[in-house]
Image: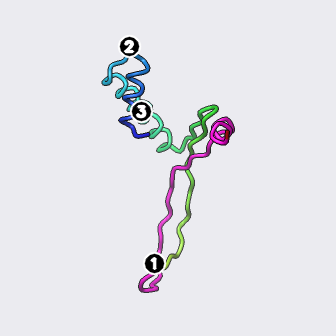
Amino acid sequence: MTKSELIAKLARRYRQLSAKDAEMAVNAILDAMTTSLEKGRRIVIRGFGSFGINHRPARTGRKSKSGQTVQVPEKYRPHFKSGRELRERIDS
């Protein structure tokens, strides 16, 4: 499901919301989640899963074509771990 599909589905399901209001709600939620992750906080949505940040330390890599070694800088990457209820619903 894409962001625009989610907005359209919310607007159809909740008739009191216009498409513009649904878009504002989705954007507000995503902005709040992004801000929390930027600050290094963890996000937990019960029954769905959790979002966190994984740290990948700096390392020495290798270019596949030339074999030359390169330094890969440290990185922080978002990580999602599904909740038990979500896993069970998908498995059934």
Looking at the rendered structure, the secondary structure element under dot 1 is strand
Question: At 41% from the left edge and 35% from the top edge, which residue is drawn?
Answer: 31
Q: Is residue 88 left or right of residue 57?
A: right
What amino acid type should be assigned to the residue bearing mark 1?
Val
Q: Spatial distance from mark 3 to mark 1, Cα to Cα?
A: 41 Å
Q: Is residue 8 above or below residue 53?
A: above
Looking at the rendered structure, the secondary structure element under dot 2 is loop
Other residues around mark 2 within 10 Å, as few (<14) / some (14–19) / many (≥20): few
- Please identify the quarter of the rendering in which residue 48 is found: top right
Report the quarter where the N terminus lies: top left
Question: At 56% from the left edge and 43% from the top edge, which residue is drawn?
Answer: 51
**Residue 81 x/y as whole percent:** 61, 45
Q: Spatial distance from mark 1 to mark 2, Cα to Cα?
A: 56 Å
**Residue 26 x/y as whole percent:** 41, 30
Q: Are marks 1 and 2 in contact (CB under 8 Å)?
A: no
Looking at the rendered structure, the secondary structure element under dot 3 is helix
Q: Circle 3 is placed at which residue position?
A: 6
Other residues around mark 3 within 10 Å, as few (<14) / some (14–19) / many (≥20): some
Q: Circle 1 is placed at which residue position?
A: 70
Q: Is residue 63 left or right of residue 52?
A: left
Of marks 1 and 2, which one's residue comes earlier in the chain?
A: 2
Other residues around mark 1 within 10 Å, as few (<14) / some (14–19) / many (≥20): few
